[in-house]
Image: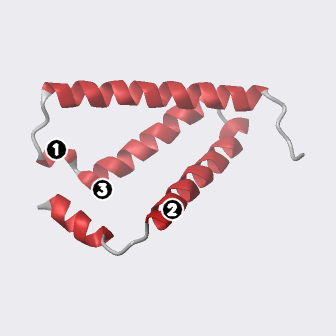
Amino acid sequence: MMRGAIASFTVGVPAQLFIVGSALIQYVGAAIAIGLFAQMSPASVAWWRVLVAASILLAWRRPWREKWSRKDLVTSMVFGVFIISMNSTFYEAIARLPLGAA
């Protein structure tokens, strides 16, 4: 039932709009995260960013309404570990590399 509602919502929306929206969310999140480097370590910023994103996804999708198999849970946990690892290493690199306007 939920998938049909989402499918009917997205009918007629150009794919480019999804790409632009996704990029906008990604870049705004990264800009906020970089601003937090003065208050927290890059690893802490990565954890907070993933926790906020996970909270938003949980509130939006409410996965507890459906039964999850063991495979689904393991897949989700592995995905989460990779996301945390990717964000942590990326933010650690940003904190150490001399980036500036060219």
The residue indicated by pointer 3 is 60
From what the image shows, is residue 60 above or below residue 64? below
Q: Which disc is residue 21 wearing?
A: 2
User: Is residue 15 something one can see in this rendering?
Assistant: yes
- Comparing 52 with 2, the one in front is 2
3 horizontally vs 29: left or right: left
The residue indicated by pointer 1 is 64
Q: Residues within 10 Å of mark 2 (few under 14, many from 20)?
A: few
Task: Residue 94 in the image: state x and y as whole percent.
Answer: 72, 32
Dot 3 and dot 1 residues touching (CB under 8 Å): no
From what the image shows, is residue 70 above or below residue 3? above
First reached walking from the N terminus: tag 1 or tag 2: 2
Q: Which quarter of the figure has residue 81?
A: top left
Which amino acid lies under the numbered mark 2 shown in the image of this protein?
Answer: Gly
Q: Residue at x 11, y 61 (%)?
A: 1
Q: Residues within 10 Å of mark 3 (few under 14, many from 20)?
A: few
- Comparing 22 with 59, the one in front is 22
Dot 2 and dot 3 residues touching (CB under 8 Å): no
